[in-house]
Image (tube, coloured by chain):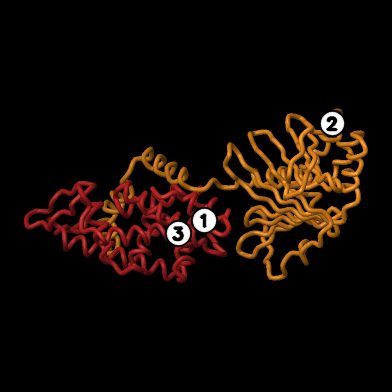
Amino acid sequence: MNASNTQDDLLKPFIDAAREPVQRIELDAAADRLRARLPQPVAAGRTWRLAGAGALVMVAVVLAPFLLGDNGHAFAAVQKWFEDYQTVHVSTEMSQNGTPIMQLQTWSDRSGSARIEMDAVVHILDTETGLMHTLLPGDRVMSVTIATAPVGQDPRAALQWLQQIRSFQGQAEALPEKRIINGVESAGYRLAVDGSEFTLWAETRDNRPTLIEANLPGGLLMRSEMVFDQPLPEDVFAVPPHYLPVQED
Amino acid sequence: MRNLFEVWRRRSGPQPEAVQALHTHAGLIITTAARILGNMADAEDVAQDIAEKMLRSPPARVGSWAALLKASAANAAIDRIRSRRTEAGHEPPEPAEGPEQVLSDAQRAAALRQAVARLSDRDALLFSLFHFGDLSHKAIAEQMNMSPNAVGVALHRLRQRLADDLRLRLGLNLPGDKQ
């Protein structure tokens, strides 16, 4: 037996004793207590569901002409905004049971390119290249082909809503009351799609849509303000050149 | 108890990676701290401090969140154990004057923790990351800016030093020594 082994043999019971100071059940309970005091994480699946919700706003905007037809002359003017826009910026707040859980910023142009910002994570859908880029904290970017995005991470999942909305057979209900939004009198239109209730508000002076509110499954509330035809930020659809590519886990 | 959610909300922008990492590795943080400190209450305090720090100033370009959080837990736990002289209820044994004494596991654990606390910051962290944090030589090397080979050599020497320290302080015989 050499000296090194005997030293290790002496030390081993000390190390073993120190490694097991607590029972597993205590450890699990302590970890759960710590997690309960943390902000809730945005899991990948939830991120994409929320991204889908952001895209849903865009879908709702784009599809509004299909949804809201045959509701009179005032509504025809509202439709025109959805048909003719060059750019749109949508600011979305998601909440659940009264607690804010996510803020989304979405920019899009009529080509379909879009930038969706969710907290510190940015998604860019580039229709010219067919790529979806995800900008991650730490100046990293993950890029996938939109057409081959993994199941559950395909932004076109929002198209499920498109199908639901396309199959919508009802009509938008013009709300009797008016609302003052950003200091401007606005008219409201309500529609229900597969258990979700959407309310669209448009300014009465020029029928410009400004706000969509929605009750989504799971107790999620969505409030989206939109601005049409304002210049988009420069390079809004570009990946910053210093970002390093990474592979998906 | 401080509300970590409020800390997070006061920040200019949330950091999903840090939040996710803290949720994923909460158990590892507490395990590492508990092994060094020997009690759960202190380990939870350490974990809370680490979480608050990570949410307030999240690091960029993290190669391994698990390794980083274990290293943070080990550092904080070592600081804390140095701030107290003995562990309540687990006093390190006194040096033996007669025949070799029989130590309980609690006494062994307390004696080792005190011995680790007497090491330099770097040596204490190195030993703790390997034996309490279960990190590989390679992972420790990345955390401590060393080569994996240097980690192995340093650990070997540390084990010898700790064994000598414990043997002399506790009057223990090496295995194989004649009684």
Q: Residue at x 64, y 65 (%)?
A: A139
Residue at numbered disc 1 = B10
Left or right: residue A38 versus residue B175 is right
Q: Is residue A184 above or below residue A126?
A: above
**In this rendering, position of residue A48 left or right of residue B146:** right
Q: Quadrant of the C terminus of chain B?
A: bottom left
- Measured in 3D between alpha carbons, the distance from the residue under mark 1 to the one under mark 2, in whole angstroms, is 42 Å
Of labels 1 and 2, the one closer to you:
1
Helix, strand or loop for disc 2 = loop
Residue at image x 79%, y 61%?
A: A232
Q: Nearer the viewer, residue A64 or B44?
A: A64
Provide the secondary structure element on which disc 3 rests: helix
Q: Chain of mark 2?
A: A
- Label 3, on which residue? B53
Answer above or below: position of A110 versus A200: below
Residue beneath disc 2: A168
Host chain of mark 1: B
What is the letter of the orange chain? Answer: A
Q: Rounded to the nearest whole Å, what is the CA distance between mark 3 and mark 1?
A: 13 Å
In the figure, the shade used to draw chain B is red
Q: Amino acid at mark 3?
A: Lys
Query: Mark 2 Cα within 10 Å, few/some/many (few <14, many 20+)?
Result: some
Circle 1 SS class? helix
